[in-house]
Image: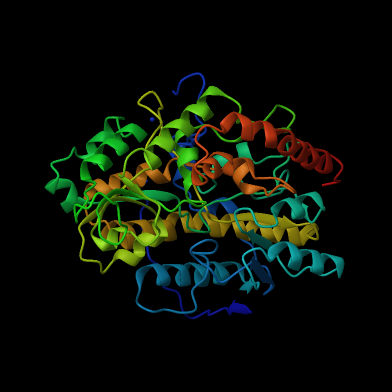
Amino acid sequence: MIKTVALLLAFSLLIPMTISCASEKASQTDTSVDISAISETPEEESEKTIYDIMGERDFGGRTFTLYNPYNWELVVDKGFWADGLTGESFNDAIYNRNLEVTEKYNFVLEEYKGAAWNSAYGDLKLNISAGEKPYNIVLTHIHGGNVAMLTEGLLRTWDDTQYIDFTKPWWNQSIIKNLNVANRTYFTAGSLTIQSPLVLIFNKTMLIENNLEDPYELVRSGKWTVDKLGELASAAALDKDGNGKWNPNIDQFGFSCPANWRVASFVTATADVSVKIDENGHPYLNLNNEAQMAAFEKLYQLFYDGNKTTTNSGVTLKTGRVLFEQSSLFDCELLKDVDIDYGILPLPKYDENQENYRTHTWTGMYALPLTLDGDELDFSCFVLEVMSALAYEKIVPVYYEQVLKSRISNDPDSAEMLDIILSNIVYDFGLCFELTGTSMPGYFISELINAKKKDQYASEYAKKAELMQKELDRIYELVLDLDT
């Protein structure tokens, strides 16, 4: 299904907004990215708008089409499209941004939606095989079909394209560092789509009733760790019917997190990335080391030592029987009308020596179809750069300030936590590329935890490591053979 923003020359509503915008042990390399660390722009340049930087252009009414694999905004496309004005601030900011930029540069904006979360590969392959050029930008799932698109030569690199400036704050720096292959950049991510990292939410009333430490102060002091989460969770756990059996439908738990893919975000938060890239752009496994195994042991203890944790997905903050719950930022929107006073926290660190609070995002990535070239490639990159900059300026602040900070976590402490979370979003190669015939490296630790394989780290690694590395080598060699 295709949606289109036509040029409305007589109508333009603008919403001016301002954007609000910590060394680990030697065995734990910090892979997070602090937005404030991005190279500063000279004062005179920082005063320029994106329109000043990009200059005047007239695209003669041509169409810019963004491919979105699926109608599932919680995972992929939140922040790109709005059908019309509704009076809701986030929706209207998107609509007005789209109207403003299409009017400014005389083009039409379209969104094409595929049939499933992993449909990008099949649709793109079909169109390229037919010699068609239907998409200017492909938005992918976080990992569905990415290896096939890459190794089969369906994508071109972002390297040496005009107009895209990856030093700007609307581009995530971690993805550029951690996902390059053969020193080529095929995937990127930025402000055009709203990021939804996993976080912790907590019941403030329950915290006070149990006379527990203020987690906000723990975060600020750098003491918000896996051990501390476990300590507070244990203090809040309660066998409410006193029968000595822990029933997810009756009893109170200190921590709730389903034993599924969500556990992988805890690994990112407490350990190094599962796959690293060497100086040649060759991906290699980073699982057989002290830091990863230590993180596994701490997380296993959090989930299975005592009765503080439930992995039952039905036991959520809404039940009033959970102190801490792992959630996503998008899921927090669903709590707007819940009569529970709650706050937002980053996922905990491994220990106090870890400088930054980190999280992996589960939002999709941008890719360039191979068929783009010449003027069409320049058009695609020009529009994406402008729309990403405008999203950073006009869309992201509305979402996080009004939708999250004001409506949901309407306290300055959670707002501060939100800034910490969003400044440290990390991408892991092992969570973004599915490997043929073996597990994804980014899920290795979480799968051990989910399957309760407490003492099997070494044996499971021995079983899987060779095949995982072989797959990483295969990806590297295939990319080396590509022309783009």
Is 213 positioned to the left or the right of 53 in the image?
left
Is 474 positioned to the left or the right of 269 in the image?
right
Query: Can the viewer see residue 262 in this picture?
Result: yes
Q: Residue at x 39, y 35 (%)?
A: 301
Looking at this view, is 114 or 312 the one in front? 312
Q: Residue at x 54, y 51 (%)?
A: 190
Position of 348 relative to 157 (above/below): above
Is 302 positioned to the left or the right of 359 in the image?
left
Looking at this view, is 240 or 337 the one in front? 240
Q: Picture quarter containing residue 34? A: top left
Looking at this view, is 24 or 180 the one in front? 24
Looking at this view, is 483 or 478 the one in front? 478
**In the orientation shown, which residue stands out farthest toward the front?**
243
Q: Quadrant of the N terminus?
A: bottom right
**In the orientation shown, which residue stands out farthest toward the top?**
26
Where residue 93 appears, as percent x and y from the top left, is: 42, 68
Where residue 81 appears, as percent x and y from the top left, is: 52, 70
Where residue 404 appears, as percent x and y from the top left, is: 33, 59
Q: Residue at x 38, y 79 (%)?
A: 86
Query: Can the viewer see residue 429 in this picture?
Result: no
Position of 212 relative to 84 (above/below): above
Where residue 393 appears, as percent x and y from the top left, is: 44, 55
Is 109 positioned to the left or the right of 146 in the image?
left
| Coloration mode | rainbow
Q: How many marks?
A: 0
